[in-house]
Image (cartoon, rainbow, N blue to C red):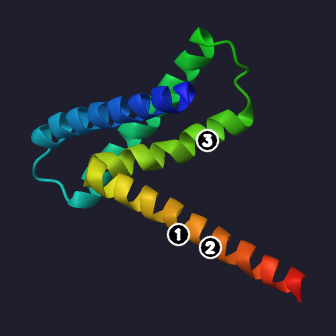
Amino acid sequence: MKTLCISLIIVALLILAVQIITEIIKSVFKDKDNIVYNLIVFGVSLFLTLVTVIAASQIVPFKLAWYIIVGAVVGSFFIAYGAMYGYDKLFKRVFESVKNAIKSFMEIEEEVKGNEKK
């Protein structure tokens, strides 16, 4: 549970950092299209996420394996989404997905129990 709380704090800080950095970059390049802004947001979130994971591997003793790097790249999409559309929309989508997954699991479990009784 402690690791989950720390992870959520790190995600929130990364989203905040991406929002701030992106806002500064946007103010410099106001005449560009939204596609460019979104690429900037993703680039910043990818860079900050990878740097954070690499720094964490130096602070907390864990081996920096390929799947951790892949996880960081995937995580950077979540960071970019949160930075582009806000925490509330990100967390709403995450919680809806978890809620639907739990609901589906419960339905499957009930169906399996029903088939076992027959």
Crowding around mark 1 (Cα neighbors within 10 Å: few <14, some 14 to 19, many 20+) is: few
Element assignment for label 2: helix
| Side (left or right) of 15 relative to 5 | left
Question: Which is nearer the N-term, disc 2 or disc 3?
Answer: 3
Identify residue for label 2. 104
**CB under 8 Å between callouts 2 and 1?**
yes
Residue 97 at x, y = what percent? 50, 64
In the visual, does 112 lie left or right of 74?
right
**Vertical arrangement, residue 38 with respect to residue 62, above or below:** below
Res 15 quadrant in image: top left
Q: Which of marks 3 and 1 is nearer the N terminus?
A: 3
- Any mark on residue 71, and which? 3
Q: Which residue is at the front of the view, 97 or 34?
A: 97
Tell me the kind of residue under disc 3.
Answer: Gly
Cα distance between the residues tagged 3 and 1: 23 Å
Image coordinates for residue 49, horizontal then vertical, percent: 47, 32
Left or right of residue 91: residue 107: right
| Position of residue 16 measured from the top left corner of the image (x, y, whole percent) | 27, 34
Tell me the quarter of the picture where residue 44 sits.
Answer: top left
Callout 3: 10 Å neighbours few (<14), some, many (20+)?
A: few
| Residue 71 in picture, x, y percent from top left | 61, 41
Residue at the disc numbered 1: 100
What's under tag 2, amino acid-wise? Ser
Going 44% across and 48% down the picture, which residue do you hit? Answer: 78
Question: Gap between marks 2 and 3, in whole Å?
Answer: 25 Å
SS at mark 3 in the image: helix
Q: What residue type is labelled 1?
A: Asn
